[in-house]
Amino acid sequence: MKGRALSYSTNELAWIEAHKTQLRRTAHAEFCQAFKRSDISFSNYTSLCKRKGWKTGRTGCYAPGSVPENKGKKMPFNANSARTQFKKGQRPHNTKHLGHEHITTDGYVEISVAEKNPHTGYERRHVHKHRWLWEKANGPVPEGMVLKCLDGDKTNTALANWEAIPRAMLPRLNGRWSLSYDAADDEVKPVIMAVAKLEQKAREMKGGL
């Protein structure tokens, strides 16, 4: 009955332990037949073995050196499954083709270009689109310089919207000592940029950063 504690005799427990390496369902069926225990469900049998620590010895993993049962065998032909199988040269529907674009978590546009990925060796890689376009027109960004978005919209990758500025200017534009460039109104942005450039020039003339 439900809620009643199940008990096992000494002989029953000894039998279960002796047959612990059998397949559980097979051992459970044989146990119920041998001891006429119709009250012991498969889950009861399994729970007992777990409590006692009577493991089957199987991990579900192939042991080193073992050979899979289907090695060398061809999958039987099935017309229904064949219709959905990839054909030679076919690519998944979500393949990131050349020119594919997406927006990163920090708001920049990335584009797939025909450049070898230095990490994976793949024939293409994703790069920041604004920098890729800027460097195609102007060459590599000079050392110590960064590209600054002028209108505050990082998805606007037009060349006119990005300007190479000294990296040392970023704290001033980020509002460390004055109004934040990105948070300012459009008509104020040019003034903040001009002041930051003057301050940076003054620091450079004094031998600063």
Image (tube, helix red, strand yellow):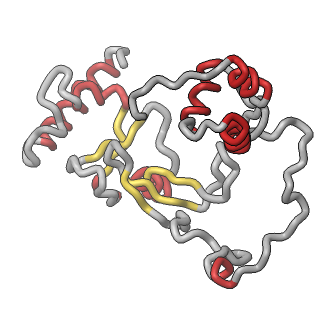
* Rendered image quadrant of residue 123: bottom right
Give left or right: position of 203 versus 23: left
As displayed, is residue 42 above or below residue 67?
Answer: above
Give left or right: position of 190 versus 89: left
Give left or right: position of 126 versus 59: left
x, y percent for residue 129: 43, 55
Q: Residue at x 32, y 15 (%)?
A: 206
As displayed, is residue 78 above or below residue 18?
Answer: below
Q: Which quarter of the rendered picture does the N terminus lie within?
A: top left
Q: Residue at x 27, y 25 (%)?
A: 171
As displayed, is residue 142 above or below residue 3?
Answer: below
Give left or right: position of 55 versus 73: left
As displayed, is residue 41 above or below residue 15?
Answer: below
x, y percent for residue 136: 49, 58
x, y percent for residue 200: 28, 26
Q: Residue at x 84, y 59 (%)?
A: 70
Q: Residue at x 14, y 42 (%)?
A: 189
Seen as rendered, the residue at the extreme front is: 36
Q: Which quarter of the rendered picture does the C terminus lie within?
A: top left
> In the image shown, does 125 or 23 lie closer to the viewer?
23
Picture mark count: 0
> In the image shown, does 17 or 58 lie closer to the viewer?
17
* Rendered image quadrant of residue 196: top left
